[in-house]
């Protein structure tokens, strides 16, 4: 009788195990896990951003159907690119690249540096939203970099934390430049350093870069002209 009962309950047990396996959360999130959007080449995404910047410089932004886009995006987002930029009010990435709602996943902090919260935000955009391009965007006359170049101690620990992140970039340039030249050189170096720091401190993004699933572009925004200039080769 016991053997017969075991056979009777076996199909129920197998069905329960199959259901548990099907509903168990995935151990590792993968890019585009939250979207079925087709992959767009990094070069095409960058070219689109540059085209948008040209429109911005010319004062001819593309018309945007914001109401319809807002309603559609209420269902979900699939930003094509992440942007790590400075908090400076004169450098809003969506305007600078003439993009619309849902196009960019933006992380902003003074000096375009990223702490653990910023890194986690970018990891989320890559793993769950499908963003495959990261633009690290500095800008001319950056106040945070200027403060780091001054060598002065900041009045609060929070301000000092920003300067401490930028200081290594200043140190690399201070023996070869001074004054305004040092500030500009340090701004560019800080973009390089910020991009390197992202990959150094995020295993998720570093692994994505190594597998050629993430492309990193470095750029500098020109306050006087509105142009975004690419710095060196993409990572």
Image: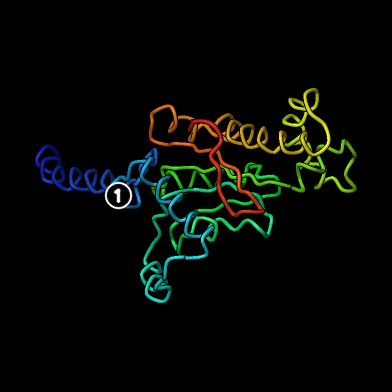
Q: Which colour assignment does the render follow?
A: rainbow
Residue furthest toward the top? 175
Which residue is labeled 1 in the image? 23
x and y percentages locating residue 10 in the rendered image = 15, 42
Instruction: Using residue 87 as the reference point, say whether residue 203 is left or right of it.
Output: left
* Quarter of the image where one finds residue 146: top right
Look at 69% across and 38% down and name the residue there. Answer: 187
x and y percentages locating residue 205 in the rendered image = 49, 35
x and y percentages locating residue 25 in the rendered image = 36, 46
Look at 45% across and 63% down and name the residue there. Answer: 100
Look at 63% across and 49% down and name the residue there. Answer: 222
Look at 65% across and 45% down and name the residue there. Answer: 112
Instruction: Using residue 24 as the reference point, say whether residue 197 is left or right of it.
Output: right
Residue furthest toward the bottom? 67
The N terminus lies in quadrant: top left
* Quarter of the image where one finds residue 150: top right
x and y percentages locating residue 168 in the rendered image = 74, 29
Q: Disc 1 on helix, strand or loop?
A: helix
Image vertical order of residue 212 relative to residue 11, above or below = above
Rate crowding at label 1 as few (under 14), some (14 to 19) or many (20 or more) other CA atoms within 10 Å: few
How many numbered marks are there? Answer: 1
């Amino acid at each position: 009788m016991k053997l017969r009962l075991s056979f009777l309950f076996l199909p129920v047990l197998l069905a329960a195990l199959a259901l548990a396996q099907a509903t168990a959360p995935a151990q590792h999130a993968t890019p585009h896990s939250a979207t079925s959007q087709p992959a767009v080449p990094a070069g095409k995404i960058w070219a689109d951003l540059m085209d948008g910047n040209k429109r911005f410089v010319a004062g001819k932004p593309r018309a945007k159907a914001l109401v319809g886009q807002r309603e559609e995006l209420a269902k979900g987002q699939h930003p094509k690119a992440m942007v790590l930029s400075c908090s400076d009010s004169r450098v809003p990435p969506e305007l600078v690249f003439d993009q619309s709602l849902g196009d960019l996943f933006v992380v902003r902090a003074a000096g375009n540096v990223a702490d653990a919260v910023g890194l986690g935000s970018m990891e989320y955009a890559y793993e769950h939203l499908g963003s495959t391009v990261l633009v690290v965007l500095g800008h001319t006359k950056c106040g945070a970099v200027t403060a780091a170049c001054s060598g002065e101690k900041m009045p609060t620990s929070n301000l000092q934390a920003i300067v401490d992140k930028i200081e290594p970039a200043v140190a690399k340039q201070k023996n070869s430049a001074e004054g305004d030249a040092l500030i500009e050189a340090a701004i560019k170096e800080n973009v390089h350093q910020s991009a390197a720091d992202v990959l150094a401190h995020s295993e998720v993004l570093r692994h994505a870069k190594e597998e050629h699933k993430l492309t990193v572009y470095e750029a500098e925004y020109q306050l006087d002209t509105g142009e975004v200039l690419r710095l060196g080769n993409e990572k």
